[in-house]
Amino acid sequence: MIYSSADRYDFRADEVVAQTEQQRNKPCFILTRPVLVEETAVWSNLGRGDYYPTVEVFLGARVWNESEVFSRGTSVISNFDTGNPALAVFDESLCYRLSGEQRPARQDVHLGRFYRYRPRLMKIGVEDGQRQRVIERVVEGVESWNDPARNPFKLANAGRQGFVGRDLMFQLLFQITLHPQKCQSDWALL
């Protein structure tokens, strides 16, 4: 039996796999196509005169209202990668602590290396000093976050706390300005 979906985070697949494993008493698997990420190293200090642009996001449980995301959630200085079309990647232990939700693990490849992650719906917010905006979206909680041998997202930047792509900018509608002399990012909600 093959169940297919065009949605990378189709949570129905978890249910289908669990039911099929129980019915057939055999292991089943979820296979996903990797998201094409054009990884380059520029902005948060990589220790060799190289930096990676960042944006501060707030993570919170999906059941929280907008103000709770900022008051109870966790601020994560995330590498902002315009070559990444769709990923929002964070430490699984943080995602679990905030959401309280245990999700089935999946496996994927980034920079030619396998990693395990647990997708879940969470709230992500951005504030610009005057306004705040929050969306609900799927994030990937990467297991073994601090182990570069098991987390390829740490290869380009060992100090990485989070990794978000350009879709977040379009979904939250913020403008980001990169200042190369100050090695600083400024963002404003539109």
Image (spheres, grey):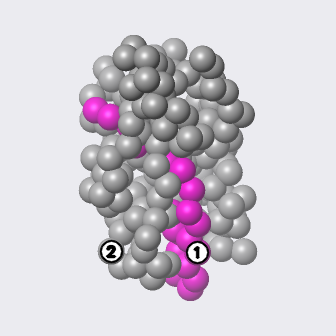
* Magenta-colored span: 124-144
Q: Nearer the viewer, residue 45 or 16?
A: 16
Residue located beneath label 1 in the image: 133
Classified by dominant secondary structure, the portion drawn in magenta counts as: strand
Read off the residue under disc 2.
72
Name the residue rendered at 54%, 42% in the picture: 11
Tell me where residue 117 appears, x and y as whole percent.
Answer: 41, 34
Residue 188 position, x and y percent, is 64, 72
Marks 1/2: CA distance?
A: 15 Å
Side (left or right) of 52 relative to 100: right
Towards the viewer: 24 or 9 = 24
Left or right for 81, reference 145: right
In the rendered image, the vertical position of residue 56 relative to residue 37, given as above or below: below
Q: Quadrant of the C terminus?
A: bottom right
- What amino acid is found at the position of numbered circle 1 in the picture? Arg
Local SS, label 1: strand
Disc with the residue nearer the chain's start (1 vs 2):
2
Can you say whether 57 is above or below 34 in the image?
Answer: below
Quadrant (top left/top right/bottom left/bottom right) for the N terminus: top right
Residue 163 locus on image (x, y percent)? 49, 44
Task: Residue at 56% x, 63% y: name it.
Answer: 136
